[in-house]
Image (tube, helix red, strand yellow):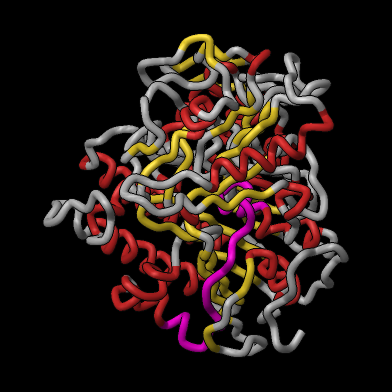
Amino acid sequence: MAGERVMVIGLDSAPPSLAFERFLPKMPNLSELLDGARYGPLRSCHPPITVPAWAVMATSLTPGELGMYGFRHRKPGEYREYYLVTSRNLTRPAVWDHAAREGKKALLIAFPPSYPPLKVQGWVISDFHTPSTAKNYTHPPWLRLEVERVAGGPFTHDVEFRVEDRGPLVERLFEMTSQHLRVAEHLARTKRWDLMWYVEIGLDRLHHAFWKFFDPSHPRHVPDSEFADVAERYYRLLDEGIGRLVQAAKDASILVVSDHGAKAMTGAFAINEWLADNGYLALEERPTEQTGLAKAKVDWDRTVAWGWGGYYSRIFVNLRGREPRGRVSPEDFESTLAQLVDDLRRVRVPGGGSLGVEAHRPAEIYPEVRGDAPDLMVYFGDLSWRAAGTMGHGRWFLPENDTGPDDAVHDWDGIYLIRDPEGRVEPGELGATIYDVAPTILSLMGLGIPDGLRGEPLLDVS
Amino acid sequence: MSRVEGEKVTLEISKELYERAKKWVESTSDFSSVEELIEFLLGEVLSEESGEQVYSPEEEEEIKERLRSLGYL
Protein backbone atom coordinates (compact mmCIF):
# COMPACT_ATOMS: atom_id res chain seq x y z
CA MET A 1 0.00 0.00 0.00
CA ALA A 2 1.31 3.45 -0.85
CA GLY A 3 2.80 5.41 2.00
CA GLU A 4 3.43 2.48 4.30
CA ARG A 5 6.90 1.55 3.13
CA VAL A 6 9.75 3.47 4.68
CA MET A 7 13.26 3.85 3.29
CA VAL A 8 15.89 5.19 5.68
CA ILE A 9 19.11 6.45 4.11
CA GLY A 10 21.71 6.82 6.85
CA LEU A 11 24.68 9.10 6.18
CA ASP A 12 27.06 8.43 9.06
CA SER A 13 28.26 11.69 10.63
CA ALA A 14 26.64 14.07 8.11
CA PRO A 15 26.47 17.52 9.76
CA PRO A 16 23.88 20.18 8.82
CA SER A 17 26.72 22.58 7.92
CA LEU A 18 27.80 20.38 4.99
CA ALA A 19 24.71 18.38 3.96
CA PHE A 20 22.17 21.20 4.29
CA GLU A 21 24.43 24.16 3.55
CA ARG A 22 27.86 23.99 1.99
CA PHE A 23 27.39 21.07 -0.42
CA LEU A 24 23.62 21.31 -0.93
CA PRO A 25 23.93 23.38 -4.14
CA LYS A 26 25.90 20.43 -5.59
CA MET A 27 23.23 17.90 -4.53
CA PRO A 28 20.18 18.20 -6.82
CA ASN A 29 18.51 15.05 -5.50
CA LEU A 30 18.81 15.99 -1.85
CA SER A 31 17.62 19.51 -2.73
CA GLU A 32 14.56 18.06 -4.43
CA LEU A 33 13.85 15.86 -1.40
CA LEU A 34 14.16 18.83 0.93
CA ASP A 35 11.54 20.67 -1.07
CA GLY A 36 8.38 19.48 0.61
CA ALA A 37 10.15 17.71 3.48
CA ARG A 38 10.35 18.30 7.17
CA TYR A 39 14.01 18.61 8.00
CA GLY A 40 16.55 20.08 10.37
CA PRO A 41 19.28 19.29 12.86
CA LEU A 42 18.94 15.94 14.64
CA ARG A 43 20.29 16.06 18.20
CA SER A 44 22.36 12.95 18.91
CA CYS A 45 22.66 11.00 22.16
CA HIS A 46 25.25 10.78 24.94
CA PRO A 47 27.78 9.84 23.65
CA PRO A 48 27.34 11.03 20.03
CA ILE A 49 29.21 8.11 18.50
CA THR A 50 28.28 5.62 15.76
CA VAL A 51 27.98 2.88 18.39
CA PRO A 52 25.61 3.49 20.22
CA ALA A 53 23.93 6.28 18.18
CA TRP A 54 22.46 4.19 15.34
CA ALA A 55 21.13 1.65 17.83
CA VAL A 56 19.60 4.50 19.84
CA MET A 57 17.96 5.80 16.66
CA ALA A 58 16.51 2.40 15.75
CA THR A 59 15.20 1.65 19.24
CA SER A 60 14.36 5.10 20.67
CA LEU A 61 16.04 3.91 23.86
CA THR A 62 18.97 5.53 25.65
CA PRO A 63 22.49 4.10 25.60
CA GLY A 64 21.95 3.31 29.30
CA GLU A 65 18.88 1.22 28.51
CA LEU A 66 20.73 -0.49 25.66
CA GLY A 67 23.86 -0.95 27.79
CA MET A 68 25.96 0.48 24.93
CA TYR A 69 28.48 3.20 25.72
CA GLY A 70 30.79 3.00 22.75
CA PHE A 71 32.60 0.50 20.55
CA ARG A 72 34.15 -1.26 23.54
CA HIS A 73 33.29 -1.98 27.12
CA ARG A 74 35.48 -2.78 30.08
CA LYS A 75 35.48 -6.37 31.22
CA PRO A 76 34.26 -6.09 34.81
CA GLY A 77 37.06 -6.49 37.33
CA GLU A 78 39.80 -6.10 34.70
CA TYR A 79 42.11 -3.10 34.47
CA ARG A 80 43.29 -3.75 30.95
CA GLU A 81 40.86 -6.08 29.22
CA TYR A 82 37.89 -4.94 27.19
CA TYR A 83 35.41 -6.52 24.82
CA LEU A 84 34.03 -5.23 21.54
CA VAL A 85 30.39 -4.31 21.23
CA THR A 86 28.71 -6.26 18.42
CA SER A 87 25.19 -7.01 17.21
CA ARG A 88 24.93 -9.52 20.08
CA ASN A 89 24.75 -6.52 22.44
CA LEU A 90 21.71 -5.15 20.63
CA THR A 91 19.18 -7.06 22.69
CA ARG A 92 16.34 -4.53 22.95
CA PRO A 93 13.71 -4.41 20.18
CA ALA A 94 14.40 -2.11 17.25
CA VAL A 95 11.87 -0.76 14.74
CA TRP A 96 12.30 -3.83 12.56
CA ASP A 97 11.43 -6.10 15.48
CA HIS A 98 8.27 -4.12 16.21
CA ALA A 99 7.41 -4.20 12.49
CA ALA A 100 8.06 -7.95 12.24
CA ARG A 101 5.30 -8.58 14.78
CA GLU A 102 2.91 -7.16 12.18
CA GLY A 103 4.41 -9.34 9.46
CA LYS A 104 6.53 -6.54 7.96
CA LYS A 105 9.92 -7.28 6.44
CA ALA A 106 13.11 -5.29 6.83
CA LEU A 107 16.17 -4.85 4.61
CA LEU A 108 19.21 -3.68 6.59
CA ILE A 109 22.43 -2.71 4.86
CA ALA A 110 25.54 -2.00 6.95
CA PHE A 111 23.64 -0.88 10.04
CA PRO A 112 26.08 -0.51 12.99
CA PRO A 113 26.40 -2.83 14.81
CA SER A 114 25.03 -5.69 12.72
CA TYR A 115 27.84 -8.24 12.79
CA PRO A 116 27.27 -11.14 13.31
CA PRO A 117 24.32 -10.56 10.96
CA LEU A 118 21.25 -9.51 12.90
CA LYS A 119 18.50 -12.09 12.61
CA VAL A 120 15.58 -10.07 11.34
CA GLN A 121 12.50 -10.94 9.35
CA GLY A 122 13.98 -9.95 6.03
CA TRP A 123 17.51 -9.38 4.80
CA VAL A 124 20.74 -8.09 6.34
CA ILE A 125 24.23 -7.21 5.13
CA SER A 126 26.39 -6.69 8.21
CA ASP A 127 28.40 -3.55 8.94
CA PHE A 128 32.07 -2.59 9.33
CA HIS A 129 32.41 -4.82 12.40
CA THR A 130 32.73 -7.64 9.85
CA PRO A 131 36.22 -9.20 9.59
CA SER A 132 37.70 -8.89 6.10
CA THR A 133 37.78 -12.66 5.55
CA ALA A 134 34.34 -13.44 7.01
CA LYS A 135 31.83 -15.09 4.74
CA ASN A 136 28.95 -15.10 7.18
CA TYR A 137 28.02 -11.46 6.64
CA THR A 138 24.45 -11.74 5.42
CA HIS A 139 21.10 -12.92 6.62
CA PRO A 140 19.93 -15.19 5.17
CA PRO A 141 23.43 -16.61 4.57
CA TRP A 142 22.79 -17.15 0.86
CA LEU A 143 22.02 -13.46 0.31
CA ARG A 144 25.82 -13.12 0.13
CA LEU A 145 25.86 -14.79 -3.32
CA GLU A 146 23.44 -12.28 -4.77
CA VAL A 147 25.25 -9.38 -3.07
CA GLU A 148 28.58 -10.49 -4.49
CA ARG A 149 27.16 -10.88 -7.98
CA VAL A 150 25.93 -7.29 -7.89
CA ALA A 151 28.98 -5.97 -6.02
CA GLY A 152 31.36 -7.63 -8.48
CA GLY A 153 33.17 -9.41 -5.64
CA PRO A 154 33.15 -9.46 -1.85
CA PHE A 155 31.18 -6.67 -0.18
CA THR A 156 33.61 -3.99 1.04
CA HIS A 157 32.71 -3.23 4.65
CA ASP A 158 35.22 -0.45 5.28
CA VAL A 159 38.34 1.29 4.02
CA GLU A 160 41.76 1.06 5.63
CA PHE A 161 42.44 4.27 7.49
CA ARG A 162 45.84 4.41 9.07
CA VAL A 163 48.09 6.06 6.54
CA GLU A 164 49.09 9.69 6.17
CA ASP A 165 49.14 9.20 2.40
CA ARG A 166 45.55 10.00 1.44
CA GLY A 167 45.91 9.32 -2.31
CA PRO A 168 45.04 5.61 -2.37
CA LEU A 169 42.29 6.18 0.18
CA VAL A 170 40.35 8.44 -2.20
CA GLU A 171 40.01 5.70 -4.79
CA ARG A 172 39.08 3.02 -2.24
CA LEU A 173 36.53 5.27 -0.58
CA PHE A 174 34.75 6.12 -3.83
CA GLU A 175 34.85 2.48 -4.98
CA MET A 176 33.40 1.25 -1.70
CA THR A 177 30.53 3.72 -1.59
CA SER A 178 29.72 3.18 -5.28
CA GLN A 179 29.56 -0.53 -4.59
CA HIS A 180 27.31 -0.03 -1.56
CA LEU A 181 24.95 2.19 -3.54
CA ARG A 182 24.82 -0.35 -6.38
CA VAL A 183 23.96 -3.17 -3.98
CA ALA A 184 21.46 -1.04 -2.04
CA GLU A 185 19.64 -0.01 -5.22
CA HIS A 186 19.52 -3.62 -6.46
CA LEU A 187 18.10 -4.93 -3.18
CA ALA A 188 15.70 -1.98 -2.91
CA ARG A 189 14.29 -3.00 -6.29
CA THR A 190 14.26 -6.78 -5.90
CA LYS A 191 13.27 -7.48 -2.26
CA ARG A 192 9.75 -7.05 -0.94
CA TRP A 193 10.74 -4.96 2.05
CA ASP A 194 8.50 -2.75 4.16
CA LEU A 195 11.39 -1.02 5.95
CA MET A 196 14.77 -0.48 4.34
CA TRP A 197 17.62 0.98 6.40
CA TYR A 198 20.97 1.57 4.71
CA VAL A 199 23.92 3.21 6.46
CA GLU A 200 26.86 4.59 4.49
CA ILE A 201 29.92 4.65 6.75
CA GLY A 202 32.13 6.04 3.98
CA LEU A 203 30.99 9.58 4.75
CA ASP A 204 32.40 9.33 8.27
CA ARG A 205 35.71 8.12 6.84
CA LEU A 206 35.69 11.04 4.39
CA HIS A 207 35.27 13.54 7.21
CA HIS A 208 38.05 12.03 9.29
CA ALA A 209 40.51 11.81 6.42
CA PHE A 210 39.82 14.91 4.36
CA TRP A 211 38.32 17.64 6.57
CA LYS A 212 41.45 19.74 6.78
CA PHE A 213 41.65 20.01 3.00
CA PHE A 214 38.29 21.71 2.45
CA ASP A 215 37.82 23.73 5.67
CA PRO A 216 39.93 26.93 5.85
CA SER A 217 39.09 27.25 9.56
CA HIS A 218 40.64 23.85 10.38
CA PRO A 219 43.69 24.35 12.68
CA ARG A 220 45.84 22.35 10.25
CA HIS A 221 44.18 23.42 7.00
CA VAL A 222 46.16 22.56 3.88
CA PRO A 223 45.40 25.20 1.23
CA ASP A 224 45.36 24.40 -2.49
CA SER A 225 45.67 20.69 -1.87
CA GLU A 226 45.05 18.08 -4.55
CA PHE A 227 42.41 16.77 -2.11
CA ALA A 228 40.54 20.08 -1.82
CA ASP A 229 37.57 18.90 -3.88
CA VAL A 230 37.38 15.31 -2.60
CA ALA A 231 34.61 16.09 -0.11
CA GLU A 232 32.47 17.87 -2.66
CA ARG A 233 32.91 15.05 -5.17
CA TYR A 234 32.02 12.51 -2.50
CA TYR A 235 28.85 14.37 -1.48
CA ARG A 236 27.90 14.44 -5.16
CA LEU A 237 28.41 10.69 -5.39
CA LEU A 238 26.11 10.25 -2.40
CA ASP A 239 23.56 12.52 -3.99
CA GLU A 240 23.48 10.50 -7.19
CA GLY A 241 22.97 7.37 -5.09
CA ILE A 242 20.19 8.99 -3.09
CA GLY A 243 18.45 9.88 -6.34
CA ARG A 244 18.63 6.29 -7.58
CA LEU A 245 17.40 4.87 -4.27
CA VAL A 246 14.43 7.22 -4.18
CA GLN A 247 13.57 6.23 -7.75
CA ALA A 248 13.71 2.57 -6.72
CA ALA A 249 10.92 3.11 -4.16
CA LYS A 250 8.73 5.92 -5.39
CA ASP A 251 5.83 4.94 -3.13
CA ALA A 252 7.94 4.90 0.05
CA SER A 253 8.35 7.56 2.70
CA ILE A 254 11.98 8.65 2.72
CA LEU A 255 14.11 9.52 5.72
CA VAL A 256 17.65 10.82 5.31
CA VAL A 257 19.36 10.82 8.69
CA SER A 258 22.75 10.93 10.38
CA ASP A 259 23.75 9.56 13.77
CA HIS A 260 25.83 12.59 14.79
CA GLY A 261 27.52 15.55 13.20
CA ALA A 262 31.19 16.26 12.56
CA LYS A 263 33.54 19.21 12.82
CA ALA A 264 37.21 20.08 12.68
CA MET A 265 39.37 18.49 15.37
CA THR A 266 41.31 20.96 17.50
CA GLY A 267 43.53 18.25 18.97
CA ALA A 268 43.64 15.61 21.67
CA PHE A 269 43.69 15.89 25.46
CA ALA A 270 45.85 13.17 27.01
CA ILE A 271 43.62 12.23 29.90
CA ASN A 272 45.96 9.72 31.54
CA GLU A 273 48.88 12.15 31.38
CA TRP A 274 46.70 14.62 33.23
CA LEU A 275 45.50 12.02 35.75
CA ALA A 276 49.12 11.00 36.42
CA ASP A 277 50.25 14.61 36.85
CA ASN A 278 47.42 15.29 39.28
CA GLY A 279 47.89 12.33 41.57
CA TYR A 280 45.00 10.20 40.33
CA LEU A 281 46.96 7.67 38.29
CA ALA A 282 50.10 6.22 39.91
CA LEU A 283 52.89 4.92 37.68
CA GLU A 284 55.88 2.85 38.73
CA GLU A 285 57.73 4.29 35.79
CA ARG A 286 56.72 7.21 33.60
CA PRO A 287 56.77 6.16 29.92
CA THR A 288 58.96 8.29 27.65
CA GLU A 289 57.36 7.21 24.40
CA GLN A 290 53.72 6.73 23.43
CA THR A 291 52.35 3.92 25.58
CA GLY A 292 48.83 2.66 26.10
CA LEU A 293 47.45 1.94 29.52
CA ALA A 294 47.65 -1.81 28.83
CA LYS A 295 51.45 -1.64 28.59
CA ALA A 296 52.17 1.13 31.09
CA LYS A 297 53.61 0.22 34.48
CA VAL A 298 50.66 1.27 36.59
CA ASP A 299 50.86 1.05 40.37
CA TRP A 300 47.25 -0.01 40.86
CA ASP A 301 47.45 -0.06 44.67
CA ARG A 302 48.05 3.70 44.63
CA THR A 303 45.83 4.58 41.66
CA VAL A 304 42.60 6.50 42.27
CA ALA A 305 41.24 6.67 38.73
CA TRP A 306 42.18 5.98 35.13
CA GLY A 307 40.76 7.02 31.77
CA TRP A 308 40.02 5.81 28.29
CA GLY A 309 40.43 7.81 25.10
CA GLY A 310 38.16 8.20 22.09
CA TYR A 311 35.76 10.93 20.98
CA TYR A 312 34.93 11.25 24.65
CA SER A 313 36.73 10.07 27.77
CA ARG A 314 35.51 7.35 30.07
CA ILE A 315 36.80 7.59 33.63
CA PHE A 316 36.91 4.63 36.00
CA VAL A 317 37.42 4.91 39.74
CA ASN A 318 39.64 2.31 41.38
CA LEU A 319 36.89 1.37 43.80
CA ARG A 320 37.61 -0.95 46.69
CA GLY A 321 35.41 -4.06 46.65
CA ARG A 322 34.81 -3.73 42.90
CA GLU A 323 38.32 -3.63 41.44
CA PRO A 324 40.99 -6.25 42.10
CA ARG A 325 43.30 -3.73 43.76
CA GLY A 326 40.80 -1.04 44.67
CA ARG A 327 42.03 2.01 46.52
CA VAL A 328 39.03 4.34 46.89
CA SER A 329 36.60 3.33 49.63
CA PRO A 330 32.91 3.28 48.70
CA GLU A 331 32.16 6.20 51.05
CA ASP A 332 34.74 8.34 49.22
CA PHE A 333 33.53 7.39 45.74
CA GLU A 334 31.26 10.39 45.09
CA SER A 335 33.61 12.98 46.61
CA THR A 336 36.52 11.55 44.59
CA LEU A 337 34.61 11.96 41.36
CA ALA A 338 33.48 15.47 42.34
CA GLN A 339 37.05 16.49 43.14
CA LEU A 340 38.33 15.02 39.88
CA VAL A 341 35.75 16.98 37.87
CA ASP A 342 36.61 20.17 39.81
CA ASP A 343 40.29 19.68 39.06
CA LEU A 344 39.59 18.99 35.38
CA ARG A 345 37.54 22.17 35.09
CA ARG A 346 40.60 24.21 36.06
CA VAL A 347 42.60 22.98 33.06
CA ARG A 348 43.49 25.71 30.55
CA VAL A 349 44.15 25.03 26.88
CA PRO A 350 47.41 26.15 25.26
CA GLY A 351 47.06 29.86 24.64
CA GLY A 352 44.63 30.25 27.52
CA GLY A 353 40.94 29.71 27.98
CA SER A 354 39.00 26.93 29.59
CA LEU A 355 39.19 23.40 28.22
CA GLY A 356 35.41 23.27 28.48
CA VAL A 357 34.78 20.16 30.53
CA GLU A 358 31.35 18.56 30.41
CA ALA A 359 31.09 15.58 32.77
CA HIS A 360 28.19 13.22 33.39
CA ARG A 361 27.52 10.32 35.69
CA PRO A 362 25.63 7.72 33.60
CA ALA A 363 22.86 7.46 36.21
CA GLU A 364 22.22 11.20 35.86
CA ILE A 365 21.61 11.13 32.12
CA TYR A 366 19.99 7.73 31.57
CA PRO A 367 16.79 6.40 33.13
CA GLU A 368 18.48 3.02 33.49
CA VAL A 369 22.16 1.99 33.43
CA ARG A 370 22.69 -1.51 32.06
CA GLY A 371 25.88 -3.33 31.20
CA ASP A 372 29.40 -2.10 31.77
CA ALA A 373 29.11 1.68 32.04
CA PRO A 374 32.02 3.95 33.01
CA ASP A 375 31.88 5.91 36.27
CA LEU A 376 32.14 9.20 34.44
CA MET A 377 31.69 10.36 30.84
CA VAL A 378 33.64 13.50 29.92
CA TYR A 379 33.63 15.73 26.83
CA PHE A 380 36.35 18.28 26.18
CA GLY A 381 35.86 21.60 24.39
CA ASP A 382 32.33 20.71 23.33
CA LEU A 383 33.84 17.66 21.52
CA SER A 384 36.48 19.72 19.64
CA TRP A 385 39.22 18.07 21.68
CA ARG A 386 39.16 14.28 21.52
CA ALA A 387 40.55 12.23 24.42
CA ALA A 388 43.86 10.39 24.07
CA GLY A 389 44.29 7.42 26.39
CA THR A 390 47.98 6.95 25.71
CA MET A 391 50.84 8.34 27.82
CA GLY A 392 54.47 9.24 27.21
CA HIS A 393 53.73 12.48 25.38
CA GLY A 394 55.18 14.67 28.14
CA ARG A 395 52.25 17.09 27.73
CA TRP A 396 48.48 17.14 28.02
CA PHE A 397 47.56 18.65 24.68
CA LEU A 398 48.44 16.96 21.39
CA PRO A 399 47.96 18.61 17.99
CA GLU A 400 47.05 15.26 16.43
CA ASN A 401 45.17 12.11 17.33
CA ASP A 402 47.36 9.55 19.13
CA THR A 403 46.11 6.50 17.19
CA GLY A 404 46.49 7.68 13.61
CA PRO A 405 45.90 10.62 11.27
CA ASP A 406 42.55 12.28 11.89
CA ASP A 407 41.09 15.64 10.91
CA ALA A 408 37.61 15.56 12.39
CA VAL A 409 35.73 14.96 15.61
CA HIS A 410 32.06 14.37 16.21
CA ASP A 411 29.43 17.02 16.82
CA TRP A 412 26.09 16.96 18.59
CA ASP A 413 23.81 17.65 15.67
CA GLY A 414 23.36 15.31 12.77
CA ILE A 415 20.66 15.78 10.14
CA TYR A 416 17.20 14.47 9.40
CA LEU A 417 14.79 14.83 6.54
CA ILE A 418 11.36 13.22 6.16
CA ARG A 419 9.52 13.20 2.88
CA ASP A 420 6.16 11.46 2.93
CA PRO A 421 4.21 10.94 -0.30
CA GLU A 422 1.00 10.80 1.76
CA GLY A 423 1.57 14.32 3.10
CA ARG A 424 1.60 13.37 6.77
CA VAL A 425 4.47 15.70 7.64
CA GLU A 426 4.32 19.47 7.70
CA PRO A 427 7.16 20.72 5.46
CA GLY A 428 9.66 23.09 6.98
CA GLU A 429 12.78 23.36 9.08
CA LEU A 430 12.53 22.24 12.70
CA GLY A 431 14.88 20.54 15.16
CA ALA A 432 14.32 16.97 16.37
CA THR A 433 16.17 14.38 18.42
CA ILE A 434 17.61 11.02 17.55
CA TYR A 435 14.93 9.48 19.79
CA ASP A 436 12.15 10.73 17.50
CA VAL A 437 13.23 8.66 14.48
CA ALA A 438 11.95 5.21 15.51
CA PRO A 439 8.46 6.40 16.54
CA THR A 440 8.29 8.38 13.29
CA ILE A 441 9.13 5.27 11.25
CA LEU A 442 6.52 3.20 13.08
CA SER A 443 3.87 5.88 12.51
CA LEU A 444 4.71 6.15 8.82
CA MET A 445 4.33 2.36 8.55
CA GLY A 446 0.92 2.58 10.17
CA LEU A 447 2.10 0.67 13.24
CA GLY A 448 1.46 1.33 16.92
CA ILE A 449 4.16 2.85 19.10
CA PRO A 450 5.16 0.63 22.04
CA ASP A 451 5.38 2.04 25.54
CA GLY A 452 8.72 3.19 26.82
CA LEU A 453 10.15 4.79 23.67
CA ARG A 454 11.95 8.05 24.46
CA GLY A 455 10.90 10.10 21.44
CA GLU A 456 7.80 11.32 19.65
CA PRO A 457 6.65 10.76 16.06
CA LEU A 458 7.39 13.77 13.86
CA LEU A 459 4.07 13.51 12.03
CA ASP A 460 1.21 15.93 12.01
CA VAL A 461 -1.35 13.29 11.13
CA SER A 462 -0.83 9.83 12.59
CA MET B 1 28.03 -41.94 -8.42
CA SER B 2 30.25 -39.00 -9.18
CA ARG B 3 32.42 -37.89 -12.06
CA VAL B 4 35.41 -35.57 -11.83
CA GLU B 5 36.11 -33.24 -14.75
CA GLY B 6 38.86 -30.64 -14.26
CA GLU B 7 37.97 -28.41 -11.28
CA LYS B 8 34.36 -29.58 -11.18
CA VAL B 9 32.72 -32.78 -9.95
CA THR B 10 29.37 -34.08 -11.19
CA LEU B 11 27.15 -35.50 -8.45
CA GLU B 12 23.93 -37.46 -8.77
CA ILE B 13 20.90 -36.60 -6.66
CA SER B 14 17.31 -37.80 -6.89
CA LYS B 15 15.31 -36.33 -9.74
CA GLU B 16 12.49 -35.37 -7.41
CA LEU B 17 14.79 -33.37 -5.14
CA TYR B 18 16.44 -31.76 -8.16
CA GLU B 19 13.06 -30.70 -9.59
CA ARG B 20 12.00 -29.21 -6.26
CA ALA B 21 15.30 -27.37 -5.91
CA LYS B 22 15.06 -26.08 -9.49
CA LYS B 23 11.56 -24.77 -8.87
CA TRP B 24 12.66 -23.05 -5.69
CA VAL B 25 15.71 -21.50 -7.33
CA GLU B 26 13.52 -20.16 -10.14
CA SER B 27 11.00 -18.68 -7.71
CA THR B 28 13.60 -16.64 -5.85
CA SER B 29 16.51 -14.49 -6.92
CA ASP B 30 18.75 -15.95 -4.23
CA PHE B 31 20.58 -18.48 -6.40
CA SER B 32 21.27 -18.52 -10.08
CA SER B 33 21.22 -22.34 -10.39
CA VAL B 34 20.72 -25.59 -8.49
CA GLU B 35 24.50 -26.11 -8.68
CA GLU B 36 25.07 -22.81 -6.88
CA LEU B 37 22.51 -23.73 -4.21
CA ILE B 38 24.16 -27.08 -3.52
CA GLU B 39 27.67 -25.65 -3.55
CA PHE B 40 26.56 -23.01 -1.07
CA LEU B 41 24.78 -25.43 1.27
CA LEU B 42 27.74 -27.82 1.37
CA GLY B 43 30.05 -24.91 2.09
CA GLU B 44 27.83 -23.87 5.01
CA VAL B 45 27.71 -27.37 6.48
CA LEU B 46 31.48 -27.74 6.25
CA SER B 47 32.22 -24.22 7.47
CA GLU B 48 34.37 -23.84 10.56
CA GLU B 49 32.75 -20.59 11.56
CA SER B 50 31.16 -21.37 14.90
CA GLY B 51 28.16 -19.70 16.44
CA GLU B 52 29.62 -19.33 19.94
CA GLN B 53 32.38 -16.77 19.53
CA VAL B 54 31.74 -13.70 17.42
CA TYR B 55 35.39 -13.45 16.37
CA SER B 56 38.39 -15.75 16.14
CA PRO B 57 41.43 -14.29 17.99
CA GLU B 58 42.86 -13.10 14.65
CA GLU B 59 39.58 -11.52 13.60
CA GLU B 60 39.21 -9.79 16.95
CA GLU B 61 42.70 -8.29 16.62
CA GLU B 62 41.87 -7.13 13.08
CA ILE B 63 38.68 -5.38 14.22
CA LYS B 64 40.39 -3.82 17.25
CA GLU B 65 43.15 -2.49 15.02
CA ARG B 66 40.57 -1.15 12.56
CA LEU B 67 38.58 0.60 15.29
CA ARG B 68 41.78 1.95 16.88
CA SER B 69 43.00 3.45 13.61
CA LEU B 70 39.55 4.94 13.07
CA GLY B 71 39.86 6.73 16.40
CA TYR B 72 37.04 4.85 18.13
CA LEU B 73 39.21 3.19 20.80
Of residues A101 and A277, the one drawn nearer to the viewer in this rendering:
A277
> Quick check: A232 left or right of A203?
left
Residue A20 found in image quarter: bottom left
Q: Residue at x 44, y 39 (%)?
A: A269
Of residues A135 and B11, the one drawn nearer to the viewer in this rendering:
A135
Q: Quadrant of the C terminus of chain A?
A: bottom right
Of residues A329 and A24, the one drawn nearer to the viewer in this rendering:
A329
Q: Position of residue A164 (x, y in %)?
A: 25, 35
Of residues A456 and A317, the one drawn nearer to the viewer in this rendering:
A317
Q: Is residue A45 above or below residue A86?
A: below
Q: Which residues are magenta?
A: A32-55
Q: Residue at x 62, y 31 (%)?
A: A84
Q: Is residue A170 above or below residue A224?
A: above
Q: Position of residue A354 (x, y in %)?
A: 45, 53
Residue A434 drawn in magenta = no
Residue A33 drawn in magenta = yes
> Quick check: A401 left or right of A4?
left
Q: Residue furthest right?
A: A451
Q: Position of residue A278 (x, y in %)?
A: 53, 29
Q: Residue at x 72, y 29 (%)?
A: B14
Q: Note whether residue B29 is visible.
A: no
Q: Quadrant of the N terminus of chain A?
A: bottom right
Count of numbered circles in the view:
0
